Amino acid sequence: MKTKTYLYNTLSKKVEEFVPNEDGKVKMYTCGPTVYHFAHIGNLRSYIMEDVLEKYLRFVGYEVKRVMNITDVGHLSSDGDTGEDKMLAGARREHKTVMDIAQYYTDAFFEDCRKLSVKRPDVVEPATNCIDEFIHMIEVLLEKGYAYVAGENVYFDTSKLDNYYVLSSQKEEELQVGVRDDVEEDTNKKNKTDFVLWFTKSKFDNQELKWESPWGVGYPGWHIECSSISIRHLGEYMDIHCGGVDNIFPHHTNEIAQSEAFLGHKWCNYWFHINHLNTTGGKMSKSKGEFLTVSLLEEKGYDPMVYRMFCLQSHYRKPLEFSYEALDNVATAYEKLFKKIKAVPDEGEVDGQQVEEYKIKFAEAVGNDINTSMGLTVLYDALKADTNGATKRAVIMAIDEVLSLQLARAWEETEAASADDELKAYVEKMIQERAAAKKDKNFARADEIRDELREKGVQIKDTREGVQWEVVR
């Protein structure tokens, strides 16, 4: 499909035409979850929008390889290298091992993704699978003079960079100890912006997961994971790196620093960041207020597709405020959309030219910095179009490859209901025929009818109230 894609690039602070390193191919990386607890719906907003980006790129003809890490070690309770490992805290909370916690919440995360129609990335790599790669990358950074050992830990030296803040708008003075809650003094650091590449026992002794390294028994810092995993699976040049806006600093800033120091050249051209989902009390988090999960929304009677549509109606770079009233409005809109789609008849021949025209309209709308609300507008326009049912259905199915609102369920439900009606009419007709055969003492024919029904998965039973039947296949 000949259409241009424009994305806001956090690196340049402007919307740019997207041009991949290799024509027709996109290498894309997603910062995955730290699997110490369920993902809340604020986390999942990011994964929904990254899913739309991937599916849109495939829709317009790119071959996409998408990689996601699973953080199962090394992410401390503060992104500024302080606190304790979130995985250890989760294991203590539930009286389980770290790896048991990691597996349980990894499975729970992907189950939530399934409910929300979020495609599983092509590569999903737990951090604990890649310890040798982390150690190798750190060794190279030490050899090149970008890292140093202090207090038995290994640190990245940010003073060796010309522009450490290339991705973010942070200023060095904003990071003074005491000015920001997430920056605490580490006396081992040469510079306050330096960050840990490898922790040893000097950090704390109760870490459950530890590995031998040239610097002592320990475990990797959080930031080294994504750099190493992405280079392992996508090579030295990446097209798009995704994450939430809270990843911009320090996590993605640190990724750029260590990756480009390691590689010796620019690493990733486009940085795609999704804004927060807020409640009336501010940014959603696991530590305050009602812990909003997909399962909780389901318990309250919401289809997960309603939450996906709630996200799609807003632009990914804008903060989105959650309330049940807002979700109720979207639930009503989704129900109305579903009814309109259900009413589209399966008739006529597909007009291929019209389908292609609508696909281009949709691609141009969404291709303007992943504008999903405009993509939904194209969907509604297609429903109102002066064309036959078969063409409308083809357009809807094409658009839903990207929106993934499970719109085909409307027709599946209609077809299932129709099939149920046909089966009911057939069974009742056969029961009447069997009653007539028995009245005529034609018991052989009555038995044949019972057998015919059984072959179709229908079991009948003679009772005082009459003949009862059920589908048993």
Image: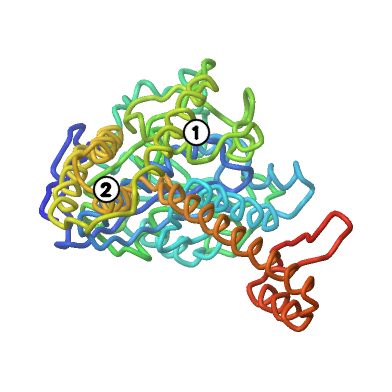
Q: Where's the C terminus, which quadrant?
A: bottom right
Q: How is the image coloured?
A: rainbow
Which sits in the foreground, 415 or 94? 415
Q: Which residue lies at the image location 43% right of the left edge and 22% below the top edge?
A: 176
Q: Nearer the viewer, mark 1 or mark 2?
A: 2
Residue farthest toward the bottom in the current orientation of the protein: 444
Which sits in the foreground, 398 or 384? 384
Describe the element under mark 2 as helix, strand or loop: helix
Mark 1 or mark 2: name the one nearer the start of the chain: 1
From the image, tell me which residue sits under label 1. 42
Q: Position of residue 224 (x, y in %)?
A: 44, 52
Mark 2: few/some/many CA within 10 Å (<14, 14-19, 20+): many
Position of residue 221 in the picture relative to residue 317 (left or right): right
From the image, tell me which residue sits under label 2. 392
Q: Position of residue 445 (x, y in %)?
A: 72, 80
Q: Position of residue 184 (x, y in %)?
A: 52, 28
Residue farthest toward the right in the current orientation of the protein: 464
Position of residue 124 in the picture relative to residue 362 (left or right): right
Q: Which residue lies at the image location 34% right of the left edge and 33% below the top edge?
A: 316
Query: For the residue marked with disc 2, what is the amino acid?
Result: Lys
The residues tagged by marks 1 and 2 sit, at their Cα atoms, a distance apart of 34 Å
Q: Quadrant of residue 215?
A: bottom right
Which sits in the foreground, 439 or 417? 439
